[in-house]
Amino acid sequence: MRLIDTVAAFRKELDADRAGGRSVGLVPTMGYLHDGHASLIRASADERDLTAVTLFVNPLQFAANEDLSTYPRDLERDIEIATRAGADVLFAPPVEQMYPDGVPVATTVTVAGPSEGYEGASRPTHFAGVATVVAKLFAIAGECRAYFGEKDYQQLVVLRRMARDLAFPVDVIGCPTVREADGLAMSSRNVFLSAEQRAAAPVLHRALIAGRDAIERDGERDPSAVVSVITGVVAAEPLATLDYTAAVRADDLSVPTVLAGAVRLLIAARFGTTRLIDNLGAAA
């Protein structure tokens, strides 16, 4: 595997591979890789001739009160995991490569509609930061398939819309959430949970399953009734503080009057100072 740390070298590498007739897969990450990231890399390696993984802790998507300085980093471990999963190129640029004029930047990307509400309401600057850095990565990488996990479902919807609106030559591929044996969605932030909080955290997945059962088994079509089911499960766990939950249309995250077709159940909660998100699909 080739480790690259400059924009120019990364662009040159992928351009050369495409010129040689090879298809490219892109897996953007903020590092501290886990099995969820590895599943994205494997998906790309199965479908593309070359898989490029990016490791960049993006300062634009952290608010002043969030955990940029403490976000976990381990480049050697990331190299090992990415190599084992099938990555061919690892792009790990310093901040000055991605933002040569410093932060804040003069130009940002805002995706109206799907970026509003939920994570967008709880973290108002987050999606502009995500969309901006991913737009830069798409511009640098060129024609490719880009693989993202469904765990960050709102992000996936935002990036699909951005790629379509800005005509990037990139197919945005969503891959299933990878979970621990007890149902907890894999996340780099799980490392911050205490033993007691870690034992409590799977309540999010149980709550989503209860919401899905209300729709698919019991025939519930009222979004607010489904939300009440989910909220009730979380309320029974004293270590969980619910931020939000919602039953929305899967394609654009809007809340229908009556649930129909593909539905996505969203949830976010805090366990102490650690904030976790999760989601689950359902068919109404």
Image: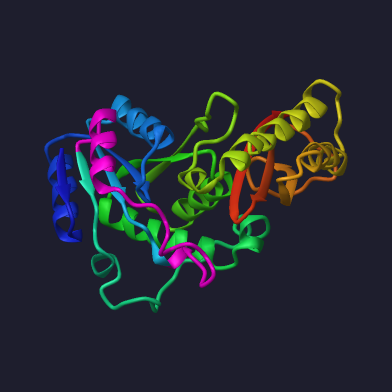
The one of 85 and 256 positioned closer to us in this rendering: 85
Residue at point 54%, 23% (across, down): 181
User: Quick one: which residue is furthest to the front in this view?
Assistant: 195
The one of 69 and 139 positioned closer to us in this rendering: 69
Return the x and y of residue 138 as percentages of the image width and height: 33, 53
Does residue 13 sit above or below 120 in this rendering?
above
Residue 10 sits inside the magenta stretch: no
Does residue 1 sit above or below 215 in this rendering?
below
Horizontal side of residue 263 vs 87, given as left or right: right
Q: Quadrant of residue 219?
A: top right
Position of the C terminus, as image quadrant, is top right
User: Quick one: which residue is furthest to the top in this view?
Assistant: 217
Horizontal side of residue 163 vs 222, given as left or right: left
Residue at point 47%, 51% (across, down): 164
**What scheme was used to colour the molecule?**
rainbow
Position of the N terminus, as image quadrant, is top left
Horizontal side of residue 129 vs 5, given as left or right: right
Residue at point 24%, 36% (across, down): 80
Residue at point 23%, 40% (across, down): 79
Horizontal side of residue 89 vs 228, given as left or right: left
Q: Which residues are magenta?
A: 60-88
Return the x and y of residue 64 as percentages of the image width and height: 51, 72
Q: Quadrant of residue 81?
A: top left
- Asked if one can make out residue 271 in the rendered structure from this viewpoint, the answer is yes
Return the x and y of residue 14 as percentages of the image width and height: 19, 46
Residue 70 sits inside the magenta stretch: yes
Return the x and y of residue 15 as percentages of the image width and height: 17, 48
- Asked if one can make out residue 284 in the rendered structure from this viewpoint, the answer is no
The one of 84 and 150 positioned closer to us in this rendering: 84
Does residue 45 sit above or below 61 in this rendering?
above
Does residue 147 sit above or below 97 in this rendering?
above
